[in-house]
């Protein structure tokens, strides 16, 4: 599933930034947002430890206070929250006049919060804010207070922050906390933030919309619909459209369809098609099928066709294959074949194989179907299907496409066939194609390419083998190119080898070229 991300417009402190970023992510999983007391994610803990490391690096390592911070850091790295709390508590008692006492209070509160000792953590944060009003840890302390407020029954602090002036990052965290404790009140504040004439920043308004659909449940749908229909700012409508796609509410589909059928903005229309695709209802699938068949805008049709392939439904397969049969536009047909390749079902594979094998069909469409077969779940079965096409068809373009698709499979049978074609008596174009794709599979084929060169009689194929050797970026290949440049019977092939040696940055190649110039 493709997910839009709404980025912060300015830099925030590390703790606040992590929470704000979570609130701004347009994701359907509300649990991704921070919950006080929950087990930290690996990313979040790593970020916190890195921040503490940067702080410690600024202090003199030989000072006892700095050593105490290092011990505390070790406990936090080990997620030993009791040990960390004890260490920072001892620091505060031992160094009451230290210039880093505010930092110690913050990390003590952090360790207490991890132990779910919320009241104790809040008391340390209050002391930090009261005694060190200019501390660089102040905003982090206020952010943590807002995280803890719903658990301590302090909703007024959250509401005062949402209603206050400035500090958008803290407002976002406060609004998130309010939604977690009282979704109805959270929706009231969203309506206030989005009302005409509001002085709320773009960042806060976008975040409010994202929090609305993440936490509002069924009650959020009418407000999201109102935002989509009545807001004039496309930047605010976009997250609301995305949110409608996450609700799975039937009421959303009519609004989304209106945006698609009567578009005023290309990006909004694309967002609406995507939002319809996120609904897992029969009506949503029917809407995508209708758009794929009848939308007057070609881009809309192609998007609907693409998302049909992502639904995983047999109904979508039937609709796509029927549409392919009735469609005459090549680009649309190619999109259908690609969409079928994403479905990865037996029915989709069978249809792609039928198109690929159709000797009387359009060559470009057949090539598209052959390439789409690579997505099949069974690599060996796909290899067999491709080999049967290669054996039955004399068209060079079709054969070259089969060779390319074989090179995409992680299949011993496909690899063996590439070697057979490269060595065999097939046409020169097919052999060159196989040689090229063997060279793209890495150093394991270098000895094979060298042996092919030594056994080859056709200069055109040897020329291609020289290029393939140069592509491998391997010492054995480099030395074979030097040997060709020194003593091949063909002057033209020697010149080709010298040219490709000149493209190498290897010192051995440079020395050989310098020797030629002496």
Image (tube, rainbow, N blue to C red):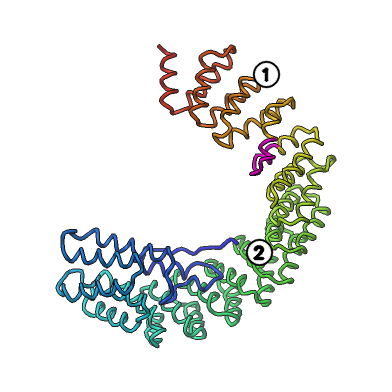
Was residue 414 drawn as part of the magenta stretch in this picture?
Answer: yes
Front residue of 335/199: it is 335
Q: Which residue is mark 2?
A: 273
Residue 387 coordinates in the image, percent (x, y): 75, 39
Residue 198 vs 376, above or below: the answer is below
**Is there CB contact under 8 Å for labels 2 and 1?**
no
| On-image quarter of the C terminus | top left
Front residue of 205/381: it is 381
Q: Which residue is mark 1?
A: 458
Q: Nearer the viewer, mark 2 or mark 1?
A: 1
Assign a secondary structure to mark 1: loop
Q: How many marks?
A: 2
Over which residues does the magenta segment extend? 403-416
Was residue 440 drawn as part of the magenta stretch in this picture?
Answer: no
Front residue of 245/311: it is 311
Residue 371 coordinates in the image, percent (x, y): 70, 44
């Amino acid at each position: 599933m493709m997910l839009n991300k709404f980025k912060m417009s300015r830099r925030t402190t590390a703790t606040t930034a992590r929470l704000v970023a979570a609130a701004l992510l347009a994701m359907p999983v509300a649990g991704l947002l921070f919950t006080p007391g929950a087990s930290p994610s690996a990313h979040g803990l790593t970020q916190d430890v890195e921040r503490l490391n940067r702080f410690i690096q600024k202090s003199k390592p030989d000072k006892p206070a700095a050593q105490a911070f290092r011990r505390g850091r070790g406990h936090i790295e080990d997620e030993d929250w009791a040990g960390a709390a004890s260490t920072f508590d001892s620091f505060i008692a031992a160094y009451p006049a230290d210039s880093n006492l505010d930092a110690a209070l913050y990390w003590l509160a952090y360790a207490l919060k991890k132990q779910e000792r919320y009241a104790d953590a809040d008391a340390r944060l209050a002391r930090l804010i009261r005694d060190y009003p200019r501390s660089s840890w102040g905003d982090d302390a206020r952010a943590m207070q807002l995280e803890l407020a719903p658990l301590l029954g302090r909703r007024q602090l959250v509401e005062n922050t949402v209603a206050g002036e400035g500090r958008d990052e803290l407002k976002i965290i406060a609004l998130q906390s309010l939604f977690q404790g009282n979704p109805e009140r959270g929706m009231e504040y969203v309506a206030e933030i989005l009302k005409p004439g509001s002085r709320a920043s773009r960042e806060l308004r976008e975040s409010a919309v994202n929090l609305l659909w993440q936490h509002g449940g069924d009650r959020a749908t009418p407000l999201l619909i109102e935002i989509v229909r009545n807001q004039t700012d496309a930047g605010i409508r976009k997250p609301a459209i995305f949110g409608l796609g996450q609700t799975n509410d039937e009421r959303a589909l009519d609004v989304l369809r209106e945006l698609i059928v009567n578009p005023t903005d290309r990006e909004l229309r694309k967002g609406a098609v995507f939002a319809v695709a996120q609904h897992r209802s029969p009506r949503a699938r029917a809407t995508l099928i209708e758009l794929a068949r009848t939308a007057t805008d070609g881009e809309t049709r192609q998007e609907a066709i693409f998302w049909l392939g992502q639904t995983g439904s047999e109904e979508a397969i039937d609709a796509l294959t029927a549409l392919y049969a009735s469609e005459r536009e090549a680009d649309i047909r190619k999109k259908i074949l690609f969409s079928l390749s994403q479905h990865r079902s037996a029915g989709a594979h069978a249809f792609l194989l039928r198109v690929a094998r159709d000797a009387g069909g359009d060559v470009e469409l057949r090539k598209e179907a052959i390439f789409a077969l690579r997505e099949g779940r069974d690599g060996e079965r796909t290899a067999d299907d491709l080999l049967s096409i290669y054996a039955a068809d004399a068209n060079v373009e079709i054969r070259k496409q089969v060779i390319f698709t074989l090179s995409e499979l992680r299949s011993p049978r496909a690899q063996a066939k590439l070697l057979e074609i490269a060595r065999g008596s097939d046409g020169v174009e097919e052999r060159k194609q196989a040689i090229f794709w063997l060279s793209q599979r890495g150093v394991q084929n270098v000895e094979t390419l060298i042996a092919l060169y030594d056994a080859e009689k056709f200069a055109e194929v040897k020329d291609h083998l020289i290029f393939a050797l140069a592509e491998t970026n391997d010492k054995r290949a480099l030395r074979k190119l030097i040997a060709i440049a020194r003593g091949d019977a063909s002057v033209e092939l020697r010149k080709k080898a010298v040219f490709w040696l000149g493209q190498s940055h290897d010192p051995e190649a440079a020395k050989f070229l310098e020797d030629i110039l002496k």
